[in-house]
């Protein structure tokens, strides 16, 4: 595994590419004759919503390409991989700006959600579209001449569609006016998290790098998907767990899943293992918009036999074992893949605290 210093240096190099990307996008808006206040608005939105996250997705494009190549990337190869990485971070910015509106969230990455700033409000909807539009502008500018240009476009389009399907079932399963916990199940949760998170967060970065590397065998993409979808599911279970258990100052966001009546991993575990008395407390308090009800639900979560922290620790350990098993089963010669692509990604997220 890379040292702390090596990781910080890789992150700094990747972050260094963002200024150039922002400059290109702003130069385009200026060139279209947009007034200075519009150019400034876009600049503020780009810097507020794109670079401040963990960058796991973006960095994974660069790391995957380097591992597949088996040698250091040239300057040009690095720049192009980083650009694709930033396209995923733009996609993530697009999703988060709109997700925070839909989830009525308060903070994100340690600052108020973009829409919650007085001067922004519903303009955030348009700002999210502008983050998405940037992806296709950059892809056209830098990859139009490549044989795999259409493959890149398809990957972004398809994973966006999948993510919106996941977001749809996340939202309609969390009806805020009619709380009915009998509609939840771990099977439904599985479908929600695979679609809303796993495709764009795990499959997309690796598949993009595979396309750039020239891998064309569809079976190789299936093999990658078979590992990355369960890895993404594990990642979203962590997100659900941390929503109730991580200190907001560490997580960078205040959890809203209980207030929002979300079909989260936590509530499904509580429904599965809780006593009838605990179930009654859940029915009476879940999805209510007040802090006291939320606190009652949180108290139940940690009580026996629900014991979410203990069950999560066990789930995390078992997921790691299962994913390691899947990785070890990869046939490197047949697929042209490298096991290290997947271990490197898993290392980035295993036992994360934010
Ligand atoms: C994570 O859900 C999923 C997304 C952010 C994808 C949103 C998709 C759209 C099409 C907008 P979450 O609400 O649990 O994330 P968080 O906890 O970060 O708010
Ligand atoms: Mg959401
Ligand atoms: Mg959310
Ligand atoms: Mg969440």
Image (cartoon, rainbow, N blue to C red):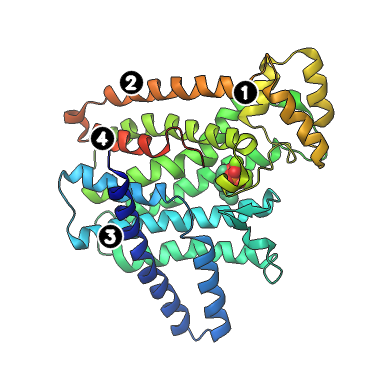
In the rendered image, residue 317, in percent from the top left (x then y), is placed at 45, 22
- Check residue 308 in the rendering and tell me which mark sits there, or answer none: 1
Mark 2–mark 4 Cα distance, whole angstroms, equals: 13 Å
Circle 3/circle 1 CB separation < 8 Å:
no
Mark 1–mark 4 Cα distance, whole angstroms, equals: 32 Å
Indicate the quadrant of ligand 1 in the picture. top right
- Check residue 325 in the rendering and tell me which mark sits there, or answer none: 2
Left or right side of 280 for 133: left
Q: Earlier in the sequence, mark 2 or mark 4?
A: 2
Residue 206 or 44: which is nearer the viewer?
44
In the rendered image, residue 103, in percent from the top left (x then y), is placed at 68, 48
Q: Earlier in the sequence, mark 1 or mark 2?
A: 1
Is residue 338 visible from the viewing direction of this image? Answer: yes
- The residue drawn where x is 42% and y is 63% is 136
Is residue 208 visible from the viewing direction of this image? Answer: no
Can you identify the residue that label 3 sits on? 80
Mark 3–mark 1 Cα distance, whole angstroms, equals: 43 Å
- Check residue 340 in the rendering and tell me which mark sits there, or answer none: 4
Binning the other alpha carbons within 10 Å of mark 1 as few (below 14), some (14 to 19) or many (20 upward) gives many
Mark 1: secondary structure? helix
- The residue drawn where x is 62% and y is 45% is 248
Mark 4: secondary structure? helix
């Amino acid at each position: 595994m890379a040292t702390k210093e090596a990781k910080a240096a890789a992150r700094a190099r990747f972050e260094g590419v963002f200024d150039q990307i922002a400059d290109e996008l702003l130069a385009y808006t200026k060139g279209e004759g947009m007034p200075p206040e519009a150019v400034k608005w876009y600049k503020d939105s780009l810097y507020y919503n794109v670079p401040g996250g963990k960058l796991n997705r973006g960095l994974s494009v660069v790391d995957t390409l380097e591992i597949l190549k088996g040698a250091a990337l040239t300057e040009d190869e690095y720049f192009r991989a980083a650009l694709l990485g930033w396209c995923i971070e733009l996609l993530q910015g697009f999703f988060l700006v709109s997700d925070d509106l839909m989830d009525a969230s308060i903070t994100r990455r340690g600052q108020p959600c973009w829409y919650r700033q007085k001067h922004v409000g519903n303009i955030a909807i348009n700002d999210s579209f502008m983050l998405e539009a940037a992806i296709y502008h950059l892809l056209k500018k830098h990859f139009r001449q490549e044989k795999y240009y259409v493959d890149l476009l398809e990957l972004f389009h398809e994973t966006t569609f999948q993510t919106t399907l996941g977001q749809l079932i996340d939202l309609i399963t969390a009806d805020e006016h009619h709380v009915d916990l009998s509609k939840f199940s771990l099977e439904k949760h599985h479908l929600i998290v695979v679609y809303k998170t796993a495709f764009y967060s795990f499959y997309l970065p690796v598949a993009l790098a595979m396309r750039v590397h020239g891998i064309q065998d569809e079976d190789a993409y299936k093999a990658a998907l078979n590992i990355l979808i369960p890895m993404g599911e594990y990642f979203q279970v962590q997100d659900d767990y941390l929503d109730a258990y991580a200190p907001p100052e560490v997580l960078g966001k205040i959890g809203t899943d209980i207030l929002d009546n979300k079909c989260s991993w936590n509530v499904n575990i509580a429904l599965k293992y809780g006593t009838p008395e605990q179930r009654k407390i859940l029915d009476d308090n879940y999805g209510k918009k007040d802090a006291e009800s939320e606190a009652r639900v949180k108290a139940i979560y940690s009580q026996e036999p629900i014991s979410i922290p203990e069950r999560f620790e066990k789930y995390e350990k078992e997921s790691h074992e299962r994913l390691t098993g899947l990785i070890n089963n990869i046939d490197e010669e047949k697929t042209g893949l490298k096991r290290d692509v997947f271990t490197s990604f898993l290392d980035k997220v295993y036992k994360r605290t934010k």
